[in-house]
Every structure is written in C-alpha cells, then in structure tokens.
Image (cartoon, rainbow, N blue to C red):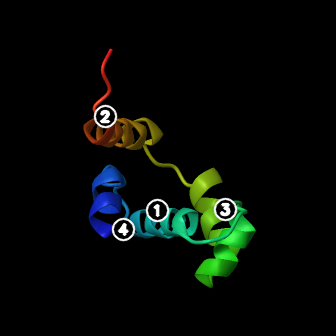
Amino acid sequence: MEEFVSEVFAPLVRRDQREKGLLYVRGLLLDGRRKSMQPMAERLGIDHQQLQQFMTSSTWPVQDVRARLAWRAVAAVRPEV
C-alpha cells in the first residue's frame, strides 16, 4: 500500500501532505461502514481535523493525483472499448 500511495501522491511537494494522503487511504481501507472523516480518524487513532484539512483546505494538484489513479485503474482493469 505504501508503494501505491507514494506513487499516486508523488505530485504532492510537501512530505506532510503525502503522509496525510497515506492516512486518508488507510482510513478508507479499514473496516467500518462509515468512510467520513470522524469515523475514519477514530479508527486511525488521530484527530479528524488532520484528514479534514488535507481534503478541504490543503492545496495540492488534484488533477495530477486523479490522472495517476486513472492510469493505475486502467492498468489493473485493462478495459476494452
């Protein structure tokens, strides 16, 4: 998972943002039905503000991260048109 996250969030210049990205992905993958910030933060044992600020206030190149995710998805699924 760390290799995946480091590749997807490579466009993020700041290390703390990449670390928050890793926490966010971990939170999404943990057991639990609710994937909103507070329940994920509880499962991670952190303050939900860290995840909230990463997703809503932190400036990072969303398009670049989305493009990397799309590339990974295409490589994994190999869609045919």
Gap in Å between the C-alphas at discs 2 and 3?
Answer: 29 Å
Whether residues under marks 1 and 3 lie with C-beta atoms below 8 angstroms apart, the answer is: no
Position of 70 relative to 40 (above/below) = above
Q: Which residue is mark 4?
A: 15
**Three-letter code for the amino acid on which mark 4 is drawn:** Arg
What is the secondary structure assignment of the residue under circle 2? Answer: helix
Q: Given this view, does label 2 or label 4 mark the residue nearer the observer?
A: 2
Instruction: Identify which amino acid the numbered label 1 is placed on.
Output: Gly
Whichever of labels 2 and 4 marks the residue nearer the N terminus, that label is 4
Marks 4 and 3, Cα distance to the nearest angstrom?
Answer: 17 Å
The amino acid at mark 2 is Val
In the picture provided, is 14 more to the left or to the right than 41? left
Any part of residue 57 in sight:
no
The residue at the far top in this view is 81
Mark 1–mark 3 Cα distance, whole angstroms, equals 11 Å
**x, y percentage for residue 79?**
32, 27
Describe the element under mark 4 as helix, strand or loop.
Answer: helix
Q: Closest to the observer: 35 or 53?
A: 35
Q: Does dot 3 land on a helix, a strand or a loop?
A: helix
Which quadrant of the rendered structure holds the N terminus? Answer: bottom left
Q: Which residue is mark 3?
A: 52
Q: Which mark is residue 74?
A: 2
Q: Residues within 10 Å of mark 2 (few under 14, many from 20)?
A: few
Q: Upstream in the sequence, badge 2 or badge 1?
A: 1
